[in-house]
Amino acid sequence: MAAGNAIDPMHQFEISKIAEFKLFGFDLSFTNSSLWMVIAVSVVSFITIFGTSSRAMVPGRLQSLAEMSYEFVANILTGVTGKEGMRFFPLVFSLFMFVLAANMLGLLPGSFTVTSHIIVTAAFAVLVILTVIVAGVINHGTHFLHLFVPSGLPALLLPFIVMIEVISFISRPISLALRLFGNMLAGHVALKLFGAFTVGLLGAGAASVFAPFPLITAVALTALEFLVAFLQAYVFTILTCVYLNDALHPGH
């Protein structure tokens, strides 16, 4: 079983229970996914809380990291939505930092990548879209529906365009969830496969001379995965800002 798990690229995504707990028939067990979520939140909390506690004029490394993270997300948010979009900063910053931390931690040997599970990315996507809908209705009332009804259209085309706009809006959380999930899943599967190729070739007698090739590829993929981990957090954040902009400016 252990040898099979070493080769199976999907075994790394299996959720295992650390501590079982049930309440009113619901399974609320603490799992490896829960553990790495707690670790990701702890890392983000450490950077933001301790990084900003001293507020030194000459910032140290931790304070510089916290300040750069703040400015990076703030620039994205204001660049897409304008200054009024800063009301959403706590949500956007929290999503960016958690996704980035979870992606990076998932590259550690023996870790678990929570963003490789569709239920996690879908939960974030639904949170974003619900925020857009609620904020849009609160800010603009029925005028928010203009998001689905472009102005200046002939009455004959209106039903078709409205249908397209509604489908486009519904597809947003789906694409938001699938993009992050798919990229993280595919990258880790590729790393696992090339690692298995390397180990297999090392024990293949004369064929072991080819072992460095998948090893070099695995190393290159690992470096690429660090870049992808950041880019996926960035893409998730900027798309979140684009969707939140509709809550502020729903008109076409």
Image (cartoon, grey):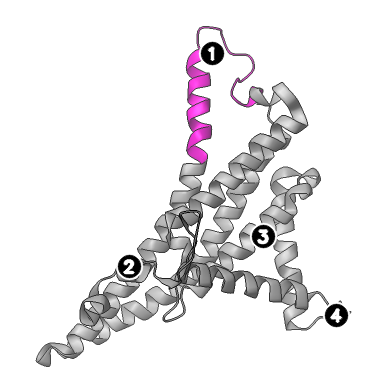
Q: Position of residue 92 (x, y in %)?
A: 67, 54
- Tell me the residue that label 1 is attached to: 158
Q: Is residue 160 magenta?
A: yes
- Residue type at numbered disc 4: Ser
Q: Residue 152, located in which quarter of the rendered image? A: top right
Q: Which mark is residue 94?
A: 3
Query: Considering depth in this image, is 210 or 69 the residue closer to the camera?
Result: 69
Q: Residue 184, located in which quarter of the rendered image? A: bottom left
Task: State the SS at label 2.
Answer: helix
Q: Which mark is residue 54?
A: 4
Mark closer to the chain start, 4 or 3 = 4
Dot 2, crowdedness within 10 Å: few (<14), some or many (≥20)?
some
Location of residue 79 with respect to 2 vertically, above or below: above
Mark closer to the chain start, 4 or 1 = 4
Question: Please, which residue is most extreme toward the left here?
Answer: 206
In the rendered structure, which segment of residues is drawn in magenta? 146-172
Q: Position of residue 38 (x, y in %)?
A: 58, 70
Q: Is residue 89 magenta?
A: no
Query: Considering depth in this image, is 128 or 182 the residue closer to the camera?
Result: 128
The Cα–Cα distance between marks 2 and 4, rounded to whole angstroms, is 42 Å
- Tell me the residue that label 2 is attached to: 189
Mark closer to the chain start, 1 or 2 = 1
